[in-house]
Amino acid sequence: MTTIGIPKEIHPGEKRVAATPQTILKLKKLGFDVVVESHAGHGINAIDSEYREAGATVIDGTKELWAASDVIMKVRPPEENKALGVHEADLLKEGATLIGFVWPAQHKDLLNRLAKRKATVFGMDCVPRITRAQKMDTLSAMANIAGYRAIIEAANHFPRFFTGQITAAGKIDPAKVLIIGAGVAGLSAIGAAKGLGAIVRAFDPRSATKDQVASMGAEFLDLDIKEKEEGEGKGGYAKQMSDDFLKAEMALFAAQAMQVDIIVTTALIPGKPAPKLITTGMVESMKPGSVIVDLAAEQGGNCALTEPGKIVHHKGVTIVGYTDLPSRMASMSSQLYGATIVALIADLSKEGILEINLDDEVVRGAIVLHDGKMMWPPPAPATPPTAAPPEPGVPTKSSAAVAAASTKKSGGHGHGESNGINPWVLAFGGLVLFGIGFLVPSEVKAAGGDTLSHLTVFILACFVGFQVVWSVKPALHTPLMSVTNAISGIILVGGMLQLVGTELSVTTILGAIAVLVAAINIAGGFLVTNRMLAMFRK
Amino acid sequence: MNQSLITIAYIAASALFILSLGGLSQQSTARRGNLYGILGMLIALVATVFAMKDGNYAVLAAALIPGLVIGAILAARVQMTSMPELVAMLHSFVGLAAVLVGFATYLGPHKAMSSGEHTLHLVEIFLGVAIGSVTFTGSVIAFLKLRGTIGGKPFMLPGRHLINLIMLIATVALGAAFLMSPDTAAGQWPLIIATVLTGILGVHFIMAIGGADMPVVVSMLNSYSGWAAAAAGFMLGNDLLIITGALVGASGAILSYIMCQGMNRSFVSVMLGGFGTEGGTPSTATGEPQGEVHSVEAAGAAELLLDAKKIIIVPGYGLAVAQAQHSLAEVCKILKEKGVEIKFAIHPVAGRLPGHMNVLLAEANIPYDIVFEMDEVNDDFPTTDVAWVIGANDIVNPSAMDDPGSPIAGMPVLHVWESRTCIVMKRGMASGYAGVDNPLFYKDNTLMLFGDAKKVVDEILTAMRG
């Protein structure tokens, strides 16, 4: 039978533990033996006897526990145990399995150590963010806690109420809170701040978050730029944006910093240091007493003045750089962490025996080392499920329809997407038309069938024309008209075909004038359309 | 370049044009759609250059290059508010080109063909010239009407339907004479007379259509210019012209139809013209909308707007002529910062082109997700504090709903009067393009704010900042 070991976390300040008595019950039910290091539940006020009652064996002594375990479940990545003078990775039984936060991109040395132990390692931070794996999504669970706690920390350092009040002693303005990044943490922070009565605004480069922000009751801040850039990278994370975008973003933050009392930053880009969004100047422009809570502190911080793990006071502004917000609510986060880890191991095992199926998308994503062999990074995840940018060759309708489904709830125009016809299909239809025109047998043409085939082409083209514009959005009527106008400049071809011979006959002159005016039409039509379209922005 | 390569190029161009039209129906693909169109046109032109047998390239360059330059300059210079005029003018060019191509084909050297083919060819030429001529003069009139050189009111001769019919019959008769002509020297006269006659027909036709229907007319002329190109394709036996012309013709017709639906008017009645005169005369008995007009100053309006929680702005052509959209965007920014909820309500025929308002608001960087179609927003008025009408009249006229005798009865309108307060900005008490008085101005919850839209919006802006 496989034995799962729960060691005590040794990272300074870490109060969480990878299993609570409740999750131990579930592990037992899955058919595992569980051993728990003595005092492992100290940080969550769970005493050894509670673990025993849940069915675990409590082992006194760190080395003994690691030696007895086939599978180790941890929170923090293994690190040097200073008290014992040994690295946790070296304590791991050869060929054993480790499950916990690993952050493989930042911990190459650790992976080498673990590889030497022929370990199999699953990173809870590597679980792909797909629907099926939501129950194992530790990052979301922790981010939820961090977002809530960020507001609590802010309130703790903020010298005023969050809600506005009119009292006999005078009027109190409500606190204004800016949340940067509307991921799980950001949304959770919005909810907490709203709940306390603050005015909340949020910004995120991914436009898909707009509705989510609104649904939490906050105002979504839009950037004042013309070219809309989509901030959604693969796997639903934000990606790095262009210079123009960043410039506009910084201008927005600078303007907001002067207005708001509290800023919570949650901006992270996977595998990169956190982007610096709040400059020293912006901090100094904030009102005295303002608070910044930097949830990205561990990755270097979104604020220039953030010191990871510490609170900084700078010219009246408090900058909270705690990196252990979930750990500050240890019993709750341990419970959630334990539950996600149970969900993962339930997927990985059958009747208490680990079975690793690398064809499973979730397993393939989460596994970092397999019997000491490097498995990270996994093959690239699929493109984000909502509002994928239309790719050439992919029907535009599908992406538009998905976007509509996710963002637009009102019915819209009568002939909305339901009637949208894939232009590529129509283009193919156009080719067929041409085929008819050119493939009519010559003997038919000789018998006056030439005009007949032209007529067939004409009628079919009319049908294509009818179909192609049915789904047009009213806002695009003018550009559409202008582009069809430009296209009708094709009459130019008719003029050109008259320009025959060298001498200036009447025909040539008439043809030349036709070419001239049609050319005005073509250049004017396309350029004006371009000008109009350039102005549309969201 | 041999024939099959040219054919392939033409196929590619047609496919690109179809993609272009398809792309223009969605915001997200619109810009790519325009690029497809440009690409298709380039391919078509280059292929045709190679297709010209014994071509006179010097003349081609002398005509083509200035044309492109002039077009580019026009497009770069035009004010966004003058867009409708430009589009109408460009339509007239296509019509003119079709006429010219028709004449050139007729007067130019002929291939040897059987008598049956010859007759068919002549029919094609005649049709092409006639459609081109109507398109040309009609577009010129539309252009002048949009510019305001000619008044917007429908111009109607007594018995105008009869006149049109007679002209049509005369054109058919001329066509018959044209077909009977023994040679080109004799045949050119019926053709020329027919051109003039159809030209007059175009003038008369468009003159009779009221200003409020201009969006539909422009779109219809767009469709005509397509048919003219298709007719030219028939006479030259060129499938690219036929397909492209048919595409433009059909899509223009659909667009006109969609617009008529937006106004709840039948396509036929728009085409027969005379908006504002058909049906019963405005029934004076059922309450000639007379009464007291309440007016307000810019400062008062600013206060009302600042105090509101929810505002719906209804822009009209007056906003466009006064170029007030940028100042309006500033006002919206201030209001938004104060937490006021702002929506824009766009009537399907607001402005002088469909989508005209959207283009203007987009130019002023007003985000299009707060801009709504009439149907999306009409139920919101009862919960709205201030409905702010800027330079619109007929599209907010309650008599379209209340007064069956009104010339605009049945046309869907924005129910601005259902809001708590309605601020109407206008230059004066003049009636709108349809020439109908508007009882909205006399309602108790309506405040009139007179003056040029740009000037007044600027005053409101100053009052808000102060």
Image: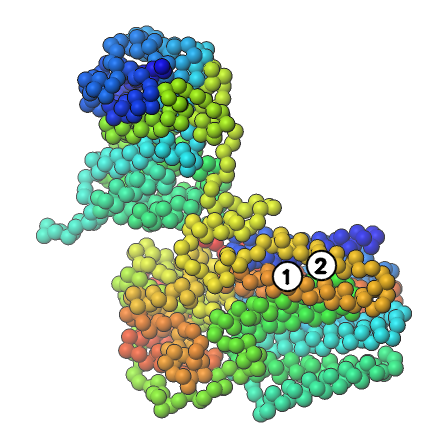
- Front residue of this view, candidates A140 and B317: A140
Work out whether A388 lies above or below B74: above
**x and y percentages locating residue B338 in the rendered image:** 30, 56
The three-letter code of the residue at mark 2 reads Leu
**x and y percentages locating residue B443 in the rendered image:** 31, 79
Question: What coloring was used for the rendering?
Answer: rainbow
Instruction: Tell me the chain of label 2.
Output: A
Q: Secondary structure at mark 1?
A: helix
Work out whether B157 lies above or below A139: below
Q: Are marks 1 and 2 on the same chain?
A: yes
Disc 1 to disc 2, C-alpha distance: 10 Å
Query: Does the CB distance between marks 1 and 2 fall below 8 Å?
Result: yes
Residue occupying image coordinates x 47% and y 49%? A402
Outermost residue toward the right?
A: B112
Residue B168 relative to residue A186: left or right: right
The three-letter code of the residue at mark 1 reads Val
Outermost residue toward the front?
A: A351
The label shown at residue A464 is 1
The label shown at residue A433 is 2
